[in-house]
Image (spheres, helix red, strand yellow):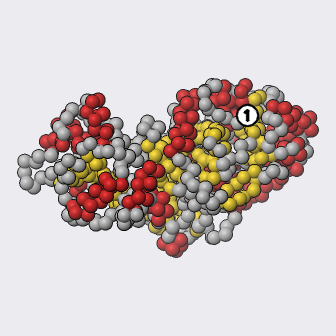
Amino acid sequence: MKHVGVSAVAVALVMALAAPSHATEQRAWVKEVADAKTWKNYSKIVATDELGKCIIDVKTNDIYFFDVNLFNIHADFVLGVLLKQAWTSDNIREYNKNYERVKPRFILCYLTHHLKIDKWSFSFWEGDKIGPDDVMKVKQKLDATFFQKNMPFRPDSPMQQKVANEIAKRGVKTITNDEVYKAADFQAFTKGKAVGKLHVVPVGTAYELLNYDRHDIVLLQESYPDITPVAGILATQFSTPLSHVNLRAGAWGIPNAGDKKARDKYAKLDGKLVYYEVNDTGMILREATAAEIAEMTTKIAAAKHVDLPVANLDNRRLAMLTRMRAKDVVIYGTKAANLGEIVTANLDGVRVPAGFGVPFYYYVQHMKENHLDAPLDALLADKRFKDPTWRKTALEGLRKAIVDAPINQQTLDMIYKRVRVRLGGKGVFVRSSTNSEDLPGFNGAGLYDTQPNVVGRKQLGEALRIVWASLWNLRAVDERDAFGIDHHQVYFGVLVQVGVNATAAGVLVTKNLWDTTDENSFTINAKYGLGMRVVEGQKVPEQIIFDPTNDGTKIISRTDDPVMLKFDEHGGIVELPVPAGAGVILSEERAKKLCTMVQKFVPVFTHGHPLDVEWVLEGEDVWIVQARPYVGN
């Protein structure tokens, strides 16, 4: 970003490098990059791109391709070499005027070789207000001095997209980040190494059948909302780092990547023990060596262990979010308690839909009154529980018993009265709020069920039993096993919350998931309609990086989902087409409003992790519906 300084020693060093004493030494800058060899000397690889930078002096029309291995940002070179000025606030303020529409002295440009798709582009910082004429000037200068001719302009912000539309009318090629992202055959989500048995999952495999061992490596040919713990994931379809599968892989610390041609490349390894490694720009998948297999067989992995908040099973009170604090996690679970902490902080402009918590007591009541507690204990103690097939069948039977068992009618009357009196009888979301989710080190994203737009007493009773039963979803049990969580200590609270019939919804993480060197920006994903489609990862969402320190917006992708989820007037949800001409969801104005709201409640959380925030948009109103620690790489 533009407001970064360097030390006086560093400036002196690079100034010396700008005038080498020997002809064989590489200059710190050149005025022409005539071939690939020169480009290699002045560029560097950052993540999946080969990056270079140049500066055009608008007064002299000189161009400077400077060594990005020596100069971290444009300002280092401009102030330290071209202007030979000290890093004072006045000089920096004057330098920053070069990001305005009218350039007083310099045009500051990026050159990128997109290695994953072998395409080139030139671009500008997303906060640069550069106009069409200056972009044309850069294009002409690059054609005359750079070995890659006729490079397309790549806009990095909504404002620059308008400029791209204008220069396209003048015959200049353009390419968007969305096109770059979707054209790539490969995408790394979690770096790492693993050895395990490869399973090529056949097309058409039902989500419920994705039952694999923690030492398996799976090749997925379709998008799935979740998966049991495995040693590595490779997918032929990929969408976003914030899908449940990708979040899960990050929490497990396993290699995880997308390769559109993976089936053709690696089908012959199906069923074999393989070595799998993922880095920023590529991956390795091959048969494991004897030494690697021996290491996998003999190595005892350090067991992960997550301590759960000790549950209070005696409290019967239905507490509104306005009466709930983080300490109440022991009664209502983490989801409700986290939102309660935000609500009771009474922060100006932070909107959370009204709701209340149903404590653990009523889940325990349901299990005891229907004599399901003893069969549960027997199931967990059975030696056959370690067998995946037996466990899957046994858990299905347990969940069915929980759903089929009658709910205590006095309890249901009490909860339904609270919906009518305190939530206006509106359709509600019945959401999980266990003591084994949304924790530092274990977020449990997507493990438990949510029932959307629940209307009426009968539907409410059904929804409560369904979400209670989801405590024993196979994926939830396997995930808790992977983190050393004692199933006997897990309890289910429920968050009943007014449903917002979202215009759009999404996820925000308070860190840049695409650039770990960026300490200021947030990652935001969005789709039209209700938010379930974002985290399921079935389609590419809108993805942007937003820097609240300067309102910079960097576009990663635009959504390609033609349908959205909306409320059904009779309860539940329906799938509808996205209206024609719906346009962009994450405009700069909406992104700024969302980030400003999130920044207000970040200090409420003291765990030191970035936040993973779920939000919904109703018209132009932003609502916060979940906040938890982000668990990823």
In this rendering, is residue 533 above or below 170? Answer: above
* Outermost residue to the left: 22
The residue under the point 58% across, 28% down is: 604
Q: Which residue is drawn at the image coordinates 60% and 27% (left, top)?
A: 348
* Res. 316 in view: yes
> How many labels, in total?
1
Residue occupied by mark 1: 354
On the picture, is 615 further left or further right than 39?
right
Mark 1 crowdedness (10 Å alpha carbons): few <14, some 14-19, many ≥20: some
Find residue 311 and report its horizontal and vertical position in percent.
73, 31
Q: Please give left or right for residue 611 compared with residue 324 in the image.
A: left
Give percent across and percent down for residue 355: 74, 34
Q: Residue at x 88, y 42 (%)?
A: 457
In-front residue for pair 419/137: 137
Q: Could you say where residue 356 lies in the image, as x and y percent from the top left? A: 76, 33
> Toward the viewer: 175 or 105?
105
**In the image, what residue type sits under mark 1?**
Ala
**Quadrant in which the N terminus is drawn:** top left
Q: Is residue 520 left or right of residue 496?
A: left
- SS at mark 1 in the image: loop
Please tell me which residue is depicted at 61% across the width and 37% down the height of the picture.
627
Q: Residue 379: tell me if it is visible.
A: no
Percent coordinates x, y for residue 121 in the rendering: 35, 60
- Quadrant of res 102: top left
Q: From the viewer's perspective, is 207 left or right of 147?
A: right
Above-or-below relation of 20 to 153: above
